[in-house]
Structure formats: structure tokens, C-alpha cells
Amino acid sequence: MNSKKQISAVFCSLFLCAGVLAGCGAQSAANGASSSRSASSGGSGSAGHYTRATKIDTVRNDAAFDGYGRLMFPVQTSFMSGSTLGTLRLTWYNHMNPDKTVEIANYFYDQVQDGRTIFYNIKTNGTDAEIEVFRGLHHGFGLGEGTVAEGWVDHAVAFWQRHMTTRDITQRI
């Protein structure tokens, strides 16, 4: 794999991780209600390692992540605002659930504490990666219907099918 593809693969991994950490969740705008999570599930209580008040830099620099905590947030800080998990906002999401963001950060932390790998160095592991860039389109083109990106979902599924094994699937069940 050439270095452009490697860099692209790393960028895609970062983008996906940031999307996961964003904790997209529909908040009820109609009644102003927000998700209520118990403290044990990483909500605004103090039972989890992180809370809404935890500084993003604290997570980013947590030794538990062995230097990879920075990958949980956009590298380009212009794509985000807020200084805590509770105030984190990402440019590409309209509805973010702070309790879900805290829950996900705590999940990652717990996984690492249990000895599980959550970040893989795809450059040194020889992991195959692909990226498609569509002329004239920026991020956020949806299914790409009626554009040069039409069919990208089928390409992604084909890639996953080529690279996922039964072991990968059963480990997640």
C-alpha cells in the first residue's frame, strides 16, 4: 500500500473514531429533554472514570491510552468546540448527547483497563485500507444518489466482506 493510501486510512480511522466519540443521539428538541443515564453507565454522575466535566485534554492525554487518546478527537481542532466532554461539539453533527459522549469515553477507558486493544497501528500491522475520493464532493454526501459517489456503499460492503472473517464477527457477538 502506498503512503497516500496509508495516510488516508489513518485519516479515515480518526474520523470514524471521532464520530463514535461524538455520541450522536437524538435529543428531544420538542420538550427539551435530554437522555438520562445512570452514573454507572457514564452519565453525568461520578461513578465512571470520566464525567461531563472532564476536560477533553484529560482524555486526549490519559496515559491509559498509551499516546493514542489524541485519536479520539478531531486532529484539526477547527472541527470541534468545547473544552469538556459535556460541552464537546463537532462541526458535522447537529445533535450530540453529552451523556453518550461520556459513556463512550468511559467504555474505551474500561476496554483498555481490561487489557483489550482499541487502537491498532494500521501502518505497521499491514492492515489493508482503501479510500474513495469523489471529485467535486466534500464529506457528507449521504448515499451519493445522483452524484459521482453513487454506489460507494456497495464498494464499502465489498471491502468489509473481503476483510472480515467469521472470527471477527463472532468476537463482537
Image (cartoon, grey):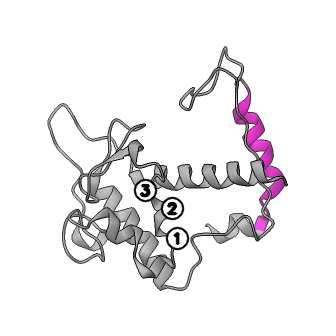
- The residues bearing labels 1 and 2 have C-alpha atoms spaced at a distance of 6 Å
- The residues bearing labels 1 and 3 have C-alpha atoms spaced at a distance of 14 Å
Q: Whole-percent x and y of residue 26?
A: 32, 41
Q: Is residue 139 above or below residue 104?
A: above
Q: Is residue 24 left or right of residue 16?
A: left
The secondary structure type at the circle numbered 3 is helix
Label 3 crowding class (10 Å Cα cut-off): few <14, some 14-19, many 20+?
Answer: many
Is residue 160 something that shows in the picture? no
Is residue 95 something that shows in the picture? yes
- Which residue in the protein does label 1 denote? 68
Residue type marked 1: Tyr
Q: Is residue 6 above or below residue 56?
A: above
Please state which of residues 173 and 121 is positioned toward the viewer in this rendering.
Answer: 121
- Please report contact status of discs 1 and 2: CB closer than 8 Å, yes or no: yes
Label 1 crowding class (10 Å Cα cut-off): few <14, some 14-19, many 20+?
Answer: some
Q: Is residue 114 above or below residue 30?
A: below
Which residue is depicted at the point 51% across and 62% down? 71
Label 2 crowding class (10 Å Cα cut-off): few <14, some 14-19, many 20+?
Answer: some
- Which residue in the protein does label 2 denote? 71
Q: Whole-percent x and y of residue 131?
A: 73, 42
Q: Which mark is residue 21?
A: 3
